[in-house]
Image (tube, rainbow, N blue to C red):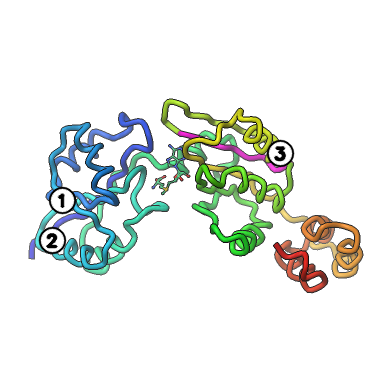
């Protein structure tokens, strides 16, 4: 059997000039373009005068058909609406099945919103975690943020215009208003904004409209300071019991974590055992 190639093609996140010449060539030469939404990709293709056939690839039955075409020797270019396919975008299922079928997979790197934001953020880039979109539901979101409480690597989140202000507030509640952060808004587009400040500063700019609540956002957040070595001279449980009597639960946890060197998520669970009503 003559086996084809699945090309994973990054497309622009705003500025169409970011489509690489090689991506244009592969999109033009592919037997088929597997798109997230053929109408969105259609606009990109017509801008570049590319006439290749397109299909959606979100259904399981379509994935099976595409694997068949690849095994028949056809080349397929996987794209999403913007940026790098399968990064907070569809593509995972097709890629997994292509690998299982032993098909050649070849990436064409290009625009990716989180890489663009991180690269401009001025925050440490040697180690980072990409968290994508936080859960929409309040409890799941609070739990995810709580789990990240001790994360020392730089954190990266995608966020929509509807939730950007609420998310910055959630980050303040969990990590403290003084944590350094960065917002990349409308990257590569006409109204691009790259703003670094502490979380309190970003919240104020969103509130006052210096950062308009319009467009697309990436948040980059400084990691936690390395935990102090565990301090055995402090009775963390006792201190927590005292502090939850006089402070909000999260603040009590933050102080005990800092003084004792114990993990915040462990202390948070202990705090909830003492004061279940302090749960988010
Ligand atoms: N696959 C894409 C990539 O490679 O970045 C991400 C797709 S995800 C569905 C869309 C999210 O990416 C947006 O909600 C926003 O958080 C971020 N994003 C995409 N384009 C952006 C841009 N031009 N500026 C800032 N953020 C952007």
- Mark 1 = which residue? 32
In the rendered structure, find residue 70 and report the number of the disc placed on it: none
The local secondary structure at tag 3 comes to helix
Identify the main secondary structure in magenta: strand
In the rendered structure, find residue 200 and report the number of the disc placed on it: 3
Residue 181 painted magenta: yes
Q: Quadrant of ligand 1?
A: top left
In the rendered structure, find residue 69 and report the number of the disc placed on it: 2
Q: Residue furthest top?
A: 190
Q: Position of residue 246 (x, y in %)?
A: 90, 59
Sooner in the amino-acid sequence: mark 3 or mark 1: 1
Q: Position of residue 21 (x, y in %)?
A: 23, 33
The local secondary structure at tag 1 comes to strand
How far separated are the C-alphas under marks 1 and 2?
A: 9 Å
- Tell me what residue is drawn at x 81 percent, y 69 percent: 275
Q: Which residues are magenta?
A: 178-186
Answer with left or right where residue 252 lies relative to residue 45.
Answer: right
Foreground label between 2 and 3: 3
Q: Residue furthest bottom?
A: 273
- Mark 1 vs 2: CB contact within 8 A: yes
Image quadrant for the N terminus?
bottom left
Sooner in the amino-acid sequence: mark 1 or mark 2: 1
- Tell me what residue is drawn at x 19 percent, y 53 percent: 55
Above or below, comparing residue 81 to residue 244 in the picture? above
Is residue 225 shown to the viewer in this render?
no
How far separated are the C-alphas under marks 2 and 3?
A: 53 Å
Answer with left or right where residue 232 lies relative to residue 134.
Answer: right
Other-residue count near label 2 (Cα within 10 Å), few / some / many at <14 / 14–19 / ≥20 = some
Disc 1 residue lies near ligand 1 with CB under 8 A: no
């Amino acid at each position: 059997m003559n086996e084809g190639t699945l090309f994973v093609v990054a497309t622009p996140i705003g500025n169409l000039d970011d489509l690489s010449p090689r991506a244009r060539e592969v999109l033009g030469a592919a037997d088929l373009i597997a798109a997230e939404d053929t109408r969105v990709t259609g606009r990109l293709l017509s801008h570049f005068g590319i006439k290749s056939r397109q299909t959606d690839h979100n259904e399981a039955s379509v994935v099976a058909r595409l694997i068949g075409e690849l095994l028949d020797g056809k080349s397929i270019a996987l794209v999403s609406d913007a940026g790098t396919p399968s990064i907070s975008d569809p593509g995972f299922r097709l890629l997994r099945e292509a690998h299982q079928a032993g098909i050649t997979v070849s990436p064409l790197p290009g625009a990716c919103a989180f890489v663009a934001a991180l690269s401009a953020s001025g925050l440490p880039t040697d180690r980072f975690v990409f968290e994508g979109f936080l859960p929409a539901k309040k409890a799941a979101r609070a739990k995810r943020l709580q789990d990240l409480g001790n994360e020392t690597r730089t954190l990266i989140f995608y966020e929509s215009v509807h939730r950007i202000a609420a998310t910055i507030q959630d980050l303040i509640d969990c990590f403290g208003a003084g944590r350094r952060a960065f917002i990349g808004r409308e990257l590569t587009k006409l109204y691009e904004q790259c703003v670094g400040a502490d979380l309190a500063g970003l919240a104020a700019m969103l509130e006052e409209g210096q950062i308009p609540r319009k467009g697309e956002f990436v948040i980059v957040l400084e990691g936690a300071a390395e935990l102090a070595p565990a301090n055995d001279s402090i009775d963390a449980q006792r201190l927590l019991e005292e502090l939850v009597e006089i402070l909000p639960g999260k603040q009590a946890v933050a102080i005990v974590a800092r003084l004792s060197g114990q993990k915040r998520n462990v202390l948070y669970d202990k705090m909830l055992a003492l004061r279940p009503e302090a749960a988010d």
